[in-house]
């Protein structure tokens, strides 16, 4: 199971590739604060926000797969402590960190500060490049042409800059299929 942050959700939603999360991970969860960030007036109405709305659920009994979890008392206490003690992170970051730490979940984020704190606290962190490479290894992205399309969409729609070593590894993994 994983906890996903808003930056991973928005990157994949903009590229119309949210399904990679569902296919890469058995259970994908996020926090209420992450979803709240997609309600900002400056982004409401954008297609990528609607794509996230279309897959989120507060109930595990629907066919939607992005489960919005409730924090328990300990997670809320830890969130408040992290938000107070750790400089450079938001309440949303603190919420994701507290849940990942308390539930021993993998954290999906491209936020370098949050990732650094998570790693220091013993939380496994996967960034977007790791998720995409995983999708190639699991043959979710099935060939080089599809892989290039996903990369191009993320670069164009989210202004993402992939490392050269990642691109080489990703495309090489797809060549082997």
Image (tube, rainbow, N blue to C red):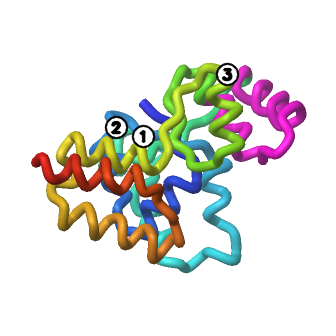
Residue at numbered disc 3: 121
| Residue 62 or residue 78, whichever sits in front | 78
Please tell me whether mark 2 or mark 1 is closer to you in this view: 2
- Residue 158 in percent (x, y) is at 51, 70
- Is disc 2 in contact with disc 1, using a CB cutoff of under 8 Å? yes
Question: In the rendered image, which quarter is residue 40 located in?
Answer: bottom right
The reply, left or right, for residue 115 in relation to residue 62 is: right
Element type at marker 3?
loop
Quadrant containing the N terminus in the rendered view: top left
Which numbered marker is on residue 84? none
Residue at 36%, 72% in the rendered image: 152
- Residue 71 in percent (x, y) is at 65, 32
Q: Magenta residues? A: 74-99
- Is disc 3 in contact with disc 1, using a CB cutoff of under 8 Å? no
Question: In the rendered image, which quarter is residue 27 located in?
Answer: top left
Residue at 70%, 75% in the rendered image: 41
Element type at marker 1?
strand
Please tell me whether mark 3 or mark 2 is closer to you in this view: 3
Residue at numbered disc 1: 28
| Residue 80 or residue 134, whichever sits in front | 134
Mark 2 → mark 1, Cα distance in angstroms:
6 Å
Residue at numbered disc 2: 25
């Amino acid at each position: 199971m994983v906890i996903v942050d808003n930056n991973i959700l928005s990157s994949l939603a903009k590229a119309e590739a949210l399904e990679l999360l569902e296919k890469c991970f058995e259970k994908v969860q996020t926090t209420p604060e992450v979803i709240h960030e997609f309600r900002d007036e400056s982004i409401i109405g954008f297609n990528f926000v609607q794509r996230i709305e279309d897959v989120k659920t507060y109930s595990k009994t629907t066919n939607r797969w992005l489960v919005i979890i409730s924090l328990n008392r300990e997670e809320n206490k830890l969130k408040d402590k992290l938000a107070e003690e750790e400089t450079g992170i938001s309440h949303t970051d603190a919420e994701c960190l507290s849940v990942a730490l308390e539930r021993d979940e993998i954290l999906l984020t491209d936020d370098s500060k949050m990732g650094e704190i998570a790693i220091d606290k013993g939380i496994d962190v996967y960034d977007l490049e790791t998720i995409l490479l995983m999708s190639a290894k699991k043959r979710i992205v099935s060939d080089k042409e599809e892989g290039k399309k996903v990369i191009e969409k993320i670069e164009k729609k989210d202004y993402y800059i992939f490392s050269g070593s990642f691109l080489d590894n990703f495309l090489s993994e797809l060549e082997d299929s």
